[in-house]
Image: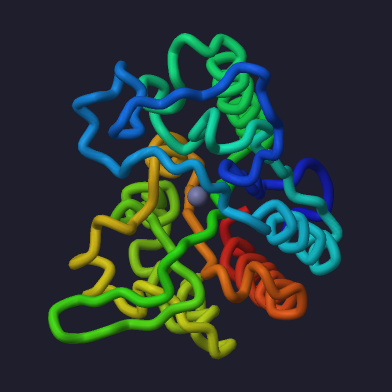
């Protein structure tokens, strides 16, 4: 890791805001803002990714302990029932709730400002964004096979990590350097468990934030989703945060 200067790591946490609005969020039947009726994506959720704020804090603090540099952290303010920060603008909130729109814009402008600080013009090297989520799933069925997992990792079929694979095309699945292989080495069950399944399973492969910010020239963006039984159990959550922090430090080291 670079011994001085700003961190090159940013952790975002879009789905665990606790802020409330006076205005009721009265969503229409299909749980999508009317500006977004044609969106083929998932329906709006009224449930937060609970404990992801704690998980994000813990990963960040573990990385600080390991590297001596505190990563940037950017946590959503409003509850997900008002704003889904991991959606594009048209689909993220009811347009008549002005505060929701403002908070959505503030959140994404905040991310862009932090990226600017991580990637000054006069420097080479990469920066990384990790978007931290919870998932309600615990297994994925493909064909007649069931894959139980603890951690789901999304890269939009490696599109969001192009900045990285342009430097080292094989790094993502490299036994000694890839983030998923490093986690597997610690005994963690990760989906996708291998490159073939990554290619077959685009649906759960990351959302708006990594697709948007992973398009930047020197930024690799990765979505990390954690199952509920680990998030809710403090000991298991802390252990996982330690493992993720350690693997991320090893994974990013050659590039920052
Ligand atoms: Zn989420």
Q: Is residue 256 above or below residue 237?
A: above
Q: Is residue 242 above or below residue 114?
A: below
Q: Quadrant of residue 148?
A: bottom left
Point out residue 111 in the picture as x, y percentages from the top left corner: 61, 31
189 on left or right of 203:
right
151 on left or right of 249:
left
Point out residue 202 in the picture as x, y percentages from the top left corner: 24, 57
Q: Residue at x 32, y 78 (%)?
A: 194
The one nearer the camera, 218 or 215, is 215
90 on left or right of 182:
left
Point out residue 197 in the picture as x, y percentages from the top left corner: 24, 74
Q: Residue at x 63, y 55 (%)?
A: 50
Q: Quadrant of residue 133?
A: bottom right
Q: Is residue 121 visible?
A: no
Colour scheme of this structure image? rainbow
Image quarter of the N terminus: bottom right
Q: Residue at x 50, y 76 (%)?
A: 150
The one nearer the camera, 154 or 226, is 226
Q: Residue at x 27, y 40 (%)?
A: 41
Q: Quadrant of residue 233?
A: bottom right
Q: Residue furthest left?
A: 143
168 on left or right of 183:
left
Q: Is residue 149 above or below residue 159?
A: below
């Amino acid at each position: 890791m670079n011994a001085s200067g700003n961190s090159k790591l940013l952790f975002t946490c879009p789905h665990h805001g606790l802020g409330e609005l006076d205005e009721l969020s009265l969503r229409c039947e299909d749980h999508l803002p009317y500006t977004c009726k044609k969106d083929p994506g998932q329906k709006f959720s009224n449930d937060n990714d609970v404990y992801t704020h704690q998980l994000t804090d813990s990963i960040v603090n573990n990385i600080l302990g390991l590297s001596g540099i505190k990563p940037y952290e950017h946590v959503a303010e409003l509850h997900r029932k008002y704003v889904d920060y991991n959606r594009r603008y048209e689909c993220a909130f009811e347009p008549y709730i002005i505060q929701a729109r403002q908070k959505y814009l503030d959140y994404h402008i905040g991310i862009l400002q932090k990226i600017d600080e991580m990637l000054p013009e006069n420097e080479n090297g990469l920066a990384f964004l990790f978007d931290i989520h919870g998932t309600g799933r615990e297994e994925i069925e493909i064909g007649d096979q069931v894959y139980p997992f603890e951690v789901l990792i999304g890269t939009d079929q490696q599109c969001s990590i192009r900045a990285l694979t342009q430097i080292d095309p094989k790094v993502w699945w490299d036994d000694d350097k890839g983030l998923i292989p490093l986690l597997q080495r610690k005994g963690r069950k990760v989906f996708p468990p291998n490159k073939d399944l990554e290619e077959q399973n685009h649906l759960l492969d990351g959302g708006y934030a990594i697709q948007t910010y992973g398009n930047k020239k020197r930024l690799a963006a990765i979505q990390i989703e954690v199952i509920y039984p680990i998030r809710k159990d403090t000991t298991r959550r802390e252990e996982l945060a330690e493992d993720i922090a350690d693997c991320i430090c090893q994974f990013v080291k050659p590039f920052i």
